[in-house]
Image (cartoon, rainbow, N blue to C red):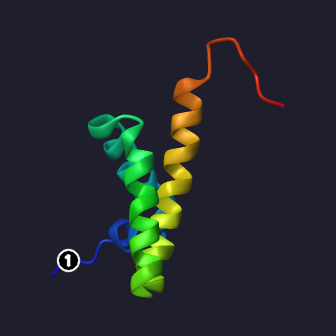
Amino acid sequence: MHYSPRLHQAAQDFDPDFYFDLVAENLLSNLGTRALGYADEALKKMKRLGDDEGFSLWLEIHAHLTTKAADALRPKGVTLH
């Protein structure tokens, strides 16, 4: 097998935010604002099941969904301070 320093470097630069952002974007594309409701339900289910890892994952997805939804719903020309 040929060693590639570039591939080795990429493996070290894992950024989970990229994937949470990708999931959030897909959910919003497919479900619109209903995606937030589904994420809320997933959080409740993970909490009820005691699934800390699942809860943590959905919490990150929910945060990205909230940011993306707020950006999408903000009228053009409006700046938040």
Give the residue at x 56% y 54%: 63
Task: Residue 3: give x, y in percent of width and height.
Answer: 27, 78
In the displayed orientation, state which residue is furthest to the right: 81
Secondary structure state at the residue bearing disc 1:
loop
Mark 1 neighbour density, 10 Å: few (under 14) some (14–19) many (20 or more): few
Observer able to see residue 56: yes
In the displayed structure image, the side of residue 67 where residue 50 appears, left or right:
left
Please give the name of the residue rendered at 72% of the width and 17% of the height, measured from the top-left corner.
78
Q: Residue at x 42, y 56 (%)?
A: 39
Image quadrant holding the C terminus, namely top right
- Look at mark 1 in the image and give the residue it sits on: 2
Q: Which amino acid type is shown beneath numbered disc 1?
A: His
Question: Camera-side residue: 35 or 41?
Answer: 41
- The picture quadrant where one finds residue 5 is bottom left
Residue 33 falls in image quadrant: top left
Residue 77: percent from the left, percent from the top? Answer: 69, 11
Quadrant in which the N terminus appears: bottom left
Left or right, residue 11 beside residue 70: left
The answer to whether residue 12 is visible is no
Residue farthest along the bottom direction in this orientation: 50
Residue in view at x 55 percent, y 45 percent? 66
Q: Position of residue 10 (x, y in %)?
A: 40, 66
Above/below status of 74 relative to 6: above
